[in-house]
Image (cartoon, coloured by chain):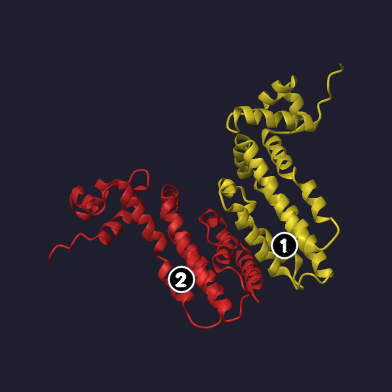
Chain colours: A red, B yellow
Amino acid sequence: MPPETLTPDRILEATEDVLRRFGPAKATVVDVARALGVSHGSVYRHFGSKAALREAVTERWLDQSHAELSAVAEAAGPAGPRLRAWLTALFAAKRRKSGSDPELFATYMVLVGENSGVVDRHIETMIEQLAGIVENGISQGEFRSVDPATAARAVWDATNRFHDPAYAADWSRPGIDAAFDAVCELVLRGLHA
Amino acid sequence: MPPETLTPDRILEATEDVLRRFGPAKATVVDVARALGVSHGSVYRHFGSKAALREAVTERWLDQSHAELSAVAEAAGPAGPRLRAWLTALFAAKRRKSGSDPELFATYMVLVGENSGVVDRHIETMIEQLAGIVENGISQGEFRSVDPATAARAVWDATNRFHDPAYAADWSRPGIDAAFDAVCELVLRGLHA
């Protein structure tokens, strides 16, 4: 078997693995290189610094749910149920991430704290998807006429108990699903024409 | 001048002062007693343990805004503007607390983390006030018919970016007032008949 080419994706996967094993305080570029069986110079050819590597792995992690959510945002049909489906998919993705691998989740919380630019871009993308749904709801006469960007940001803020990792500990508490439904209902009613 | 009687209130004021000076990790009951010029036994006669004293001072701090908010909740007139006034007063009180004395605010965040029962009771009181406004809005035909307790909890959750101390760093950012207005608008529209 020929040796695998060293791609950015392979480096990011190895970095995730190294972070999971050593934690964000101890993980080094040398650990990543060792896990890949290459020199650390080879890693630096793709990511110019440890900071750049950490930023890229954070971005990849945050973006994992983009594709799935984007499909929901662009589906056909009325905007109300689509908005609810989008919020439900986002909450499910966040719960999955925090529940299935809590150690890696904690690691990413550290990285997220380091890379606020990456987080801001992620939130911008999320709010753009929301604005698309709102805009579509207005054009179908289903939602009242509002500024889609402002309304999308308000929907994002109003639902933050169900997507902001600061609340991850709440997501397994009894009553959380009912609380989510009640906020969705309030937000949807707030948008309806 | 006769010596002042040692009341729970005087002890709590001295405790707040000691916490501000020494921080929550170092402050002791002996420090509180020394500040009051009494023996630590005298303090223990009012608060049976250091934990009880910390809990009481946390409760007092959280409750400071109750009276003001309760007056807003019970004012006359239409429920919509009253709900907005209540949310505005809550946000203003939280901002004031976090901005005017950030060190004490950080101290209280530690205490709040220790005393989740106190926090739960505080939130319950807040949601009861909200439920009173919602109920009144329904009886005046201004709000649609919902379960007041569920709707009040949803309003609380939907506005948490503007009262949860986890977001204190956001409260001085540009655009925060517009974001608050947009969420209020969404929530009020969501309740209206």
Residues packed near mark 1 inside 10 Å, few (<14), some (14 to 19) or many (20 plus): many
Question: What is the chain identity of the residue bearing mark 1?
Answer: B
- x and y, in percent, of residue A154 in the image: 59, 63
Kindly identify the amino acid type of the residue bearing the numbered disc 1. Ala
Q: Quote the CA–CA distance across marks 2 and 1.
A: 29 Å
Q: Is residue A61 left or right of residue A150?
A: left
In this figure, which residue is indicated by the disc labeled 1?
A: B152
Specify whether residue A48 is in view.
yes
Specify whether residue B121 is in view.
no
- x and y, in percent, of residue B105 in the image: 62, 39
Residue visible at 79% across and 63% down? B79
- C-beta proximity under 8 Å, tags 2 and 1: no
B100, A22: nearer the viewer: B100
Residue visible at 55% across and 69% down? A148
A73, A25: nearer the viewer: A73
Q: Is residue A11 left or right of residue B150?
A: left
Kindly identify the amino acid type of the residue bearing the numbered disc 2. Leu
- x and y, in percent, of residue A36 in the image: 22, 55
Question: What is the chain identity of the residue bearing mark 2?
Answer: A
Q: Is residue B177 left or right of residue B6?
A: left
Q: Is residue B13 left or right of residue A11?
A: right
Q: Quadrant of the C terminus of chain A?
A: bottom right
Residue visible at 77% across and 47% down? B66
Q: Quadrant of the N terminus of chain A?
A: bottom left
- x and y, in percent, of residue B67 in the image: 80, 46
Q: Which mark is on residue A69?
A: 2
Q: Quadrant of residue A175?
A: bottom right
